[in-house]
Amino acid sequence: MRNVSTTTEQVRAHIDNRVGWVTLNRPDKRNAISEGMFAAITEVLAAWEDDDEVRVVVVRGAGDEAFASGADMGELDRGEGTYPPPGARKGFTLHTRKPVLAMVHGFCIGGGLMVAMEADIRIAADDAVFAIPAGPLGAGYPLVGVQRLVSLVGPAHASTIMFTGDRFDAHRALELGLVNEVVPRAHLEERVTSIARRIASNAPLSLAAAKAVIGAVIGTPGATFGAAQALIDQCWVSDDFREGRKAFAEKRSPEFRGR
């Protein structure tokens, strides 16, 4: 395991077995996300973008109570932010060509849910609680967050979530398509680690191509079909494709290098 330095102690990062772990580290505040945390997450992922040691990223929350309880409203109340805050007009925080998993437990509210929705896969513990309380707060939820919500649950369910601001549990989130899977809290880390390592064993170029196509289909900002097709074409002429075919013929596990 290798620890990675960040610009704030409120975000911790390390690499273990080709999995990059990003931890929202404010357990005393239920991991409420400050502007500095948004920036630190972006910087960590940018540093990992061309790091062959990282094949997949997992985002999680520290402590027992929350993935993230929302944006840091106290930061705004203290006058440390601007109106509207940068987060309200933000682009994607989890911007990377690599697969991203969100490991969700406890509260996943508002800005915390926005971050979780940016992940490609969301695995939730059975104690997870979700909500977007923009209406009760009088806030404007970021455009990219609403866009992602609609792409996941559809406009009708998105309207209910946004208009009521009501909380709902992990099993309801699964029914809506907001999360991929619900597991007992005690098994959450084990399950997420298993999925992450399975993904990390696959060819990085193939993963990047698949993510690019999915992003283009759902309208992720900056994703285009042209760029996705270029990545698909790259797979077919890659050393990894040759390695994959050779490993299949030799009945062994492939050793992909992302080239």
Image: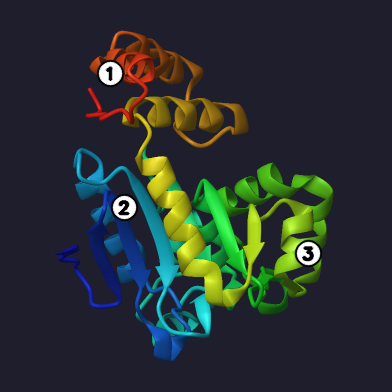
Q: Left or right of 6: which side holds 240?
A: right
Residue 87: x and y in percent read 45, 62
Residue 115: x and y in percent read 49, 59
Which numbered disc, 3 or 1, marks the residue closer to the eye? 1
Q: Residue at label 2?
A: 19
- Residue at the (54%, 70%) spot, across then down: 187
> Which quadrant of the structure image shows residue 128?
bottom right
Residue 12: x and y in percent read 27, 70
Locate the C terminus by quadrant.
Answer: top left
Q: State the residue in front, 201 or 159.
A: 201
Residue 179: x and y in percent read 65, 56
Name the kind of residue labelled 2 in the image: Val
Q: Are marks 3 and 1 in contact (CB under 8 Å)?
A: no
Mark 2: give few (<14), some (14-19) or many (20+) Cα within 10 Å.
Answer: many
Q: State the residue in front, 28 or 53.
A: 53
Question: Looking at this rendering, what residue extends furthest in the front direction?
Answer: 251
- Tell me the CA gap for discs 2 and 1: 22 Å
- Tell me the CA gap for discs 3 and 2: 29 Å
Mark found first going from the N terminus, 3 or 2:
2
Mark 3: give few (<14), some (14-19) or many (20+) Cα within 10 Å.
Answer: few
Q: Left or right of 29: which side holds 112?
A: right
- Tell me the CA gap for discs 3 and 1: 42 Å
Q: Residue at label 3?
A: 172
Mark found first going from the N terminus, 2 or 1:
2
Q: Is residue 90 visible in this depiction of the protein? A: no
- Residue at the (35%, 78%) spot, across then down: 25
- Residue at the (44%, 66%) spot, across then down: 85
Q: Is residue 240 above or below residue 192?
A: above
User: Please, what secondary structure does the residue beneath circle 2 have?
Assistant: strand
Q: Residue at label 1?
A: 243
Mark found first going from the N terminus, 3 or 1:
3
